[in-house]
Amino acid sequence: MDDEWWILGVRLAGVFHVVTLILAVRTPIPADWDAGLERLSEMHRKFAIAQNAAIGAVIAFFGIVCVGFAPQLVEGTILARMWCAAIALWWGGRLVLLPWIGVKSELKTMWLRLGFILLRLQCAIYAIAFGWLALR
């Protein structure tokens, strides 16, 4: 595949990182998130909030890196390969963890079920594509 297409693909991936983040913030999974947090101890509540903030920050940062530095990620330097490997491993890890979380009972609408399928597809595509860029 020509590098210009890879650069376009990486930039689009960056945009979709941001779209994913926006959708994640607006998606009520699990339902009654705030009520569930209230039942936790203060430490566990803060930990859950901090974890979600960290996940969001990683997605946002990867999006910025992909949009702003797509040519550098594609050129294949050692540092570029390391960043591509990090992105591939992070999304691959999410792909493995998503079924373990067990959200199917929370996917009560067709849109939520479709969104979850698309999220898993996105994880797989990113893991494969960025893995390829890391190894090529």
Image: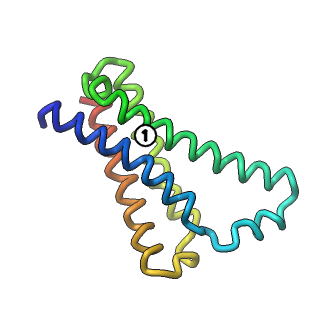
How many marks do you count on the picture?
Answer: 1
Residue 122 locus on image (x, y percent)? 36, 55
Residue 29 locus on image (x, y percent)? 59, 68
Quarter of the figure with the N terminus? top left
Identity of the residue drawn at 38% across and 49% down? 16
Residue lying furthest right: 41
Q: Is residue 114 above or below residue 121?
A: below
Residue 6 locus on image (x, y percent)? 21, 36
- State the image quarter where residue 27 is shown: bottom right
Residue located beneath label 1 in the image: 63
Q: Is residue 66 above or below residue 126?
A: above
Identity of the residue drawn at 35% across and 18% down? 78
- State the image quarter where residue 31 is shown: bottom right
Mark 1 surroundings within 10 Å by alpha-carbon count, few (fewer than 14), some (14 through 19), many (20 or more): many
Describe residue 75's horizontal placement relative to residue 60 as left or right: left
Describe residue 56's horizontal placement relative to residue 35 as left or right: left
Which color mode does the image show?
Answer: rainbow
Identity of the residue drawn at 31% across and 18% down? 77
- State the image quarter where residue 114 is shown: bottom left
SS state under label 1: helix
User: In the image, what residue type sits under mark 1?
Assistant: Gly
Q: Is residue 53 above or below residue 38?
A: above
Residue 84 locus on image (x, y percent)? 37, 32
Q: Is residue 6 above or below residue 47?
A: above
Quarter of the figure with the C terminus? top left
Identity of the residue drawn at 47% across and 55% down? 96
Describe residue 67's horizontal placement relative to residue 132 as left or right: right
Most foreground residue, 51 or 88:
51
Describe residue 33's horizontal placement relative to residue 113 as left or right: right
